[in-house]
Image: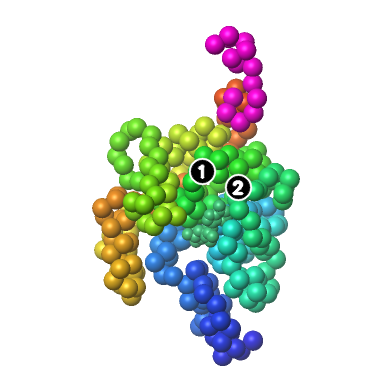
Amino acid sequence: MNDHEIRQKIEQYKFYHIIQLTDQIATPGNPVHLSTQKMVLEEIRKIDLRGKRVLDIGCRDGLFAFEAEKRGSAEVIGIDNDLSKPAVEFLIPFLKSGVKMFEMNLFDLRPDTFGRFDVVIFAGVLYHLRYPFWALKTIRDVLSNNGKLILETAIWSDKSHRALLYCPVEESPYEPTSCAFFNEKGLCTTLRSFGFEVEAIQYLSQRESLKGLLRYVGHVGHTLRRRIKEAFVKADIDRGVFTCSFSCDAVNQQLAQYWEKTHTIHTQIGG
Ligand SMILES: C[S@@+](CC[C@H](N)C(=O)[O-])C[C@H]1O[C@@H](n2cnc3c(N)ncnc32)[C@H](O)[C@@H]1O
């Protein structure tokens, strides 16, 4: 395909990710997310992915899935509940990629759907979920022992030491599908309860000044710019990447049994 044909092809689609196709041409995705995506890409590059099985949940056009493939993963699967046509029809064949993408809601994922994974990338999704705890359980269930989770999410920059999960709907700081904002303590405590050890946390606010971020969105319309500004300034919403490792031994089996299965605690204590 020559440059003219590539440009004609990409005009047929709407892209979310900016993915380099040739030295001159990239997909016209949304630049607002570049800084956050850069943090995720950096975490992916820190892991030795050679020979690993990787799952990208909420993969959109496949930016992270393609990166994982480039870094030597044995198999990369992406799922999204709104599968990207440009990824499936154009990017995968154009890049001669072996990434497999499926339209699927993460809540339908089971360990026997695709088997277990060494690495799960879960970026830009958690804060969209009405059932965030169940999502983390679902991810834990498809991770191999000692597997890694790269979790990127919008995070409530609450300085309190109490664990919090703010679940707005109409008054969401983003828009109504964004309905689950943990603070750091809330997310770390929740992750630990599922057997994850949080190894590193990176915050967008620590890397980019708000001014720099707003420069990125300078080209978008006034309403969107105002809403993004409100999200970052008024509601104190940051973006964070939490890199975690999972260990079966770290799961409190008695509590997991109580919460997720049947148990005999009340029978035994008579309470
Ligand atoms: C904000 S985009 C993030 C895309 C990409 N992961 C990134 O960080 O650049 C969220 C993506 O997750 C998908 N998504 C949201 N909820 C989902 C769910 N329950 N199961 C699967 N995908 C979901 C959306 O369709 C969308 O493509």
Q: Amino acid at mark 1?
A: Tyr
Q: Which residue is mark 2?
A: 107
Indicate the position of residue 12 as horizontal and vertical percent values.
Answer: 56, 81
Mark 2 in CB contact with mark 1 (< 8 angstroms): yes
Please check the rendered image and state whether residue 263 is part of the magenta-colored stretch, yes or no: yes
Indicate the position of residue 241 as horizontal and vertical percent values.
Answer: 45, 50
Q: Which residues are magenta?
A: 258-271
Indicate the position of residue 32 as horizontal and vertical percent values.
Answer: 39, 66
Indicate the position of residue 174 as horizontal and vertical percent values.
Answer: 37, 56
Q: Which residue is mark 1?
A: 131
- State the CA–CA distance, disc 2 to disc 1: 9 Å
Q: Which of disc 1 and disc 2 is earlier in sequence? A: 2
Name the quadrant containing residue 92. Answer: bottom right
Name the quadrant containing residue 95. Answer: bottom right
Residue pictured at 51% horizontal, 43% vertical: 131
Please check the rendered image and state whether residue 147 is part of the magenta-colored stretch, yes or no: no
Q: Is residue 146 left or right of residue 227?
A: right
Q: Secondary structure at mark 1?
A: loop
Whether the residue under disc 2 has CB within 8 Å of ligand 1: yes
Q: Look at the image and tell me whether residue 115 can be seen.
A: yes
